Image: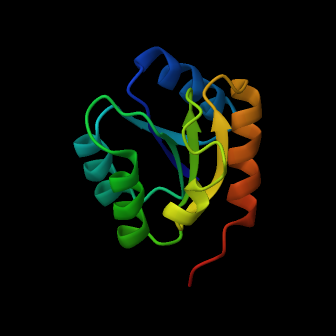
Amino acid sequence: MNVLIVESEPALADLWRKHLERSGMAVRVATTQEDAIRQIVEDEPGIIILDLVQVEGSALAVSDFASYRCPQAQVIFVTNTSFFSDGSIFAHAQNACAFVQSGTPPEDLAAMVEHYCRRRPKTA
Protein backbone atom coordinates (compact mmCIF):
# COMPACT_ATOMS: atom_id res chain seq x y z
CA MET A 1 0.00 0.00 0.00
CA ASN A 2 1.25 3.45 -0.91
CA VAL A 3 1.11 5.96 1.92
CA LEU A 4 1.70 9.70 1.65
CA ILE A 5 2.59 11.67 4.77
CA VAL A 6 1.96 15.40 4.49
CA GLU A 7 3.69 16.97 7.47
CA SER A 8 5.56 20.27 7.80
CA GLU A 9 7.70 19.01 10.69
CA PRO A 10 10.40 16.76 9.16
CA ALA A 11 11.29 14.96 12.40
CA LEU A 12 7.67 13.93 13.01
CA ALA A 13 7.20 12.84 9.39
CA ASP A 14 10.39 10.79 9.62
CA LEU A 15 9.22 9.09 12.82
CA TRP A 16 5.90 8.12 11.22
CA ARG A 17 7.62 7.05 7.99
CA LYS A 18 9.98 4.67 9.80
CA HIS A 19 7.14 2.96 11.66
CA LEU A 20 5.10 2.55 8.50
CA GLU A 21 8.03 1.19 6.50
CA ARG A 22 8.68 -1.38 9.23
CA SER A 23 5.09 -2.50 8.66
CA GLY A 24 5.85 -3.05 4.98
CA MET A 25 4.28 0.12 3.62
CA ALA A 26 5.69 2.14 0.72
CA VAL A 27 5.88 5.66 2.16
CA ARG A 28 6.51 9.07 0.64
CA VAL A 29 6.72 12.37 2.52
CA ALA A 30 5.62 15.84 1.43
CA THR A 31 6.28 18.98 3.46
CA THR A 32 4.21 21.48 1.44
CA GLN A 33 0.88 21.59 -0.36
CA GLU A 34 2.63 21.85 -3.72
CA ASP A 35 4.80 18.81 -3.01
CA ALA A 36 1.78 16.83 -1.77
CA ILE A 37 -0.20 17.60 -4.94
CA ARG A 38 2.73 16.53 -7.11
CA GLN A 39 3.13 13.27 -5.20
CA ILE A 40 -0.61 12.52 -5.36
CA VAL A 41 -0.44 12.87 -9.15
CA GLU A 42 2.68 10.70 -9.42
CA ASP A 43 1.87 7.97 -6.94
CA GLU A 44 -1.90 7.93 -6.24
CA PRO A 45 -1.58 6.91 -2.58
CA GLY A 46 -4.21 4.75 -0.93
CA ILE A 47 -3.81 6.42 2.45
CA ILE A 48 -2.75 9.97 3.25
CA ILE A 49 -1.64 11.05 6.70
CA LEU A 50 -2.32 14.77 6.59
CA ASP A 51 -1.50 17.32 9.27
CA LEU A 52 -4.21 19.97 9.43
CA VAL A 53 -1.69 22.71 10.20
CA GLN A 54 0.57 23.22 7.21
CA VAL A 55 3.37 25.79 7.13
CA GLU A 56 3.02 26.15 3.35
CA GLY A 57 -0.43 25.57 1.95
CA SER A 58 -3.76 24.16 3.03
CA ALA A 59 -4.53 20.67 4.30
CA LEU A 60 -8.10 20.93 3.06
CA ALA A 61 -6.86 21.82 -0.42
CA VAL A 62 -4.68 18.69 -0.40
CA SER A 63 -7.61 16.59 0.81
CA ASP A 64 -9.91 18.04 -1.88
CA PHE A 65 -7.36 17.41 -4.62
CA ALA A 66 -6.83 13.83 -3.42
CA SER A 67 -10.58 13.29 -3.43
CA TYR A 68 -10.70 14.39 -7.06
CA ARG A 69 -7.50 12.74 -8.31
CA CYS A 70 -7.69 9.42 -6.42
CA PRO A 71 -11.18 9.07 -4.97
CA GLN A 72 -10.38 5.75 -3.27
CA ALA A 73 -7.68 7.37 -1.11
CA GLN A 74 -8.56 7.85 2.53
CA VAL A 75 -7.18 10.59 4.76
CA ILE A 76 -6.11 10.28 8.36
CA PHE A 77 -6.04 13.85 9.65
CA VAL A 78 -3.65 14.69 12.47
CA THR A 79 -3.33 17.88 14.47
CA ASN A 80 -1.74 19.34 17.55
CA THR A 81 -4.55 21.88 18.02
CA SER A 82 -8.16 21.72 19.18
CA PHE A 83 -9.39 22.92 15.77
CA PHE A 84 -12.03 20.49 14.41
CA SER A 85 -12.03 18.68 17.77
CA ASP A 86 -15.82 18.54 17.46
CA GLY A 87 -15.46 16.07 14.59
CA SER A 88 -16.60 18.54 11.94
CA ILE A 89 -13.62 17.59 9.77
CA PHE A 90 -15.75 14.69 8.56
CA ALA A 91 -18.27 17.20 7.18
CA HIS A 92 -15.53 19.19 5.41
CA ALA A 93 -13.49 16.34 3.92
CA GLN A 94 -15.39 13.47 2.33
CA ASN A 95 -12.27 11.29 2.29
CA ALA A 96 -11.57 11.68 6.02
CA CYS A 97 -11.48 8.31 7.77
CA ALA A 98 -9.85 9.30 11.08
CA PHE A 99 -8.85 12.31 13.13
CA VAL A 100 -6.10 11.98 15.75
CA GLN A 101 -3.66 14.09 17.71
CA SER A 102 -0.11 14.54 16.39
CA GLY A 103 1.14 12.99 19.61
CA THR A 104 -0.54 9.68 18.84
CA PRO A 105 2.08 6.93 19.29
CA PRO A 106 3.55 6.08 15.86
CA GLU A 107 2.80 2.38 16.32
CA ASP A 108 -0.89 3.27 16.84
CA LEU A 109 -0.85 5.40 13.70
CA ALA A 110 0.74 2.50 11.78
CA ALA A 111 -2.00 0.18 13.07
CA MET A 112 -4.64 2.64 11.86
CA VAL A 113 -3.05 2.77 8.41
CA GLU A 114 -3.02 -1.04 8.23
CA HIS A 115 -6.66 -1.14 9.33
CA TYR A 116 -7.82 1.34 6.70
CA CYS A 117 -5.75 -0.40 4.03
CA ARG A 118 -7.67 -3.62 4.71
CA ARG A 119 -11.01 -1.78 4.60
CA ARG A 120 -10.18 -0.03 1.33
CA PRO A 121 -12.55 -1.06 -1.47
CA LYS A 122 -10.96 -3.08 -4.26
CA THR A 123 -10.89 -1.43 -7.68
CA ALA A 124 -11.13 -3.28 -10.96
- Residue at 77% across / 33% down in the picture? 108
Q: How far across and down, in percent of the image, does residue 5 sit?
A: 47, 38
Name the residue nearer the viewer: 101 or 19: 101
Image: 74 above or below 110: below
- Residue at 63% across / 34% down in the picture? 20
Q: How far across and down, in percent of the image, does residue 47 sit?
A: 56, 53
Name the residue nearer the viewer: 7 or 84: 84
Image: 53 above or below 34: above
Task: Count up the numbered dots.
Answer: 0
Q: How far across and down, in percent of the image, does residue 81 sit?
A: 55, 29
Q: Residue furthest top?
A: 11
Name the residue nearer the viewer: 19 or 13: 13
Q: How far across and down, in percent of the image, does residue 62 sit?
A: 36, 53
Image: 63 above or below 124: above
Image quarter for residue 44?
Answer: bottom left
- In screen coordinates, is 115 left or right of 13? right
Image quarter for residue 34?
Answer: top left
- In screen coordinates, is 11 left or right of 58? right
